[in-house]
């Protein structure tokens, strides 16, 4: 009958109010980070904790196991690796305005600024369509300079996984 006395409704309420925990970090975020840190779950837990993301270790172990299997067996192109050295050749192909944006981004990160906020500020302009396009291009450029691919994990997580010194070194031109 739809009332709280209806046994089916009572069961629905009991199930939806249970203590089942949902992961605070997505499968895709873990898939973007785990290969960068040699599939080390302990290091991932530390990185997530540094970002204010709380996860239970048993839950994280299970998700990491599935992510590792998925990447190694079915999606090896998702196995991100940090560039061993600065990609000078790629940087030299960039237009001057994009080179300037990379340098502004690096300077902003050096001061401890949030990487996402830095990209948004560097690309800020009145025309929202152009701004969105500029943001996408800068994100892709940063990922190319760090990972050699046009995409990757969210920048704060990438910065934490790579380490600030190495991150900064790969952007030093």
Image (cartoon, helix red, strand yellow):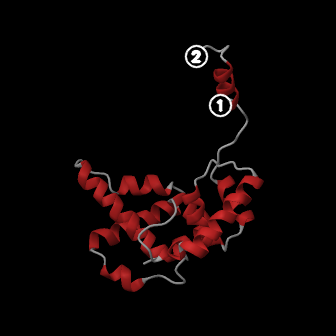
**Would you say residue 29 is visible in this rendering?**
yes
Q: Is residue 107 placed above or below 25 in the rendered structure?
A: below
**Would you say residue 171 is visible in this rendering?**
no
> Which residue corresponds to mark 1?
16
Query: Residue 112, how many percent across, how many down?
Result: 54, 57
Numbered circle sitting on residue 134 = none
Q: Quadrant of the C terminus?
A: bottom left
The residue under the point 72% across, 53% down is 59
Badge 2 density bin: few <14, some 14–19, many ≥20, Cα 10 Å: few
**Real-space Cα distance between discs 1 and 2?**
16 Å
In the image, farthest residue toward the left: 127
The residue under the point 51% across, 59% down is 154
Query: Residue 152, how many percent across, how many down?
Result: 49, 66
The residue under the point 24% across, 47% down is 126
> Which residue corresponds to mark 2?
2
Query: Residue 151, how many percent across, how many down?
Result: 44, 67
Tell me the SS state at disc 1: helix
Q: Quadrant of residue 131?
A: bottom left
Tell which of 11 and 146 is nearer to you.
11
Tell which of 150 and 50 is nearer to you.
150
Query: Residue 123, how many percent across, how many down?
Result: 33, 56
């Amino acid at each position: 009958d739809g009332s709280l006395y209806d046994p089916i409704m009572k069961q629905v309420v009991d199930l939806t109010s249970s203590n089942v925990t949902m992961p605070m970090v997505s499968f895709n975020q873990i898939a973007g980070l785990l290969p960068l840190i040699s599939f080390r779950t302990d290091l991932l837990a530390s990185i997530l904790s540094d970002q204010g993301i709380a996860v239970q270790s048993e839950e994280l172990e299970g998700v990491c196991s599935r992510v590792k299997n998925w990447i190694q067996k079915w999606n090896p192109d998702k196995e991100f690796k940090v560039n061993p050295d600065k990609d000078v050749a790629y940087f030299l192909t960039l237009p001057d305005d994009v080179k300037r944006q990379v340098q502004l981004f690096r300077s902003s990160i050096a001061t401890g600024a949030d990487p996402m906020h830095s990209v948004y500020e560097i690309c800020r302009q009145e025309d929202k369509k152009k701004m969105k396009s500029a943001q996408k291009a800068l994100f892709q450029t940063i990922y190319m300079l760090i990972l050699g691919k046009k995409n990757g994990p969210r920048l704060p997580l990438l910065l934490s996984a790579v380490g600030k010194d190495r991150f900064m070194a790969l952007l030093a031109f």
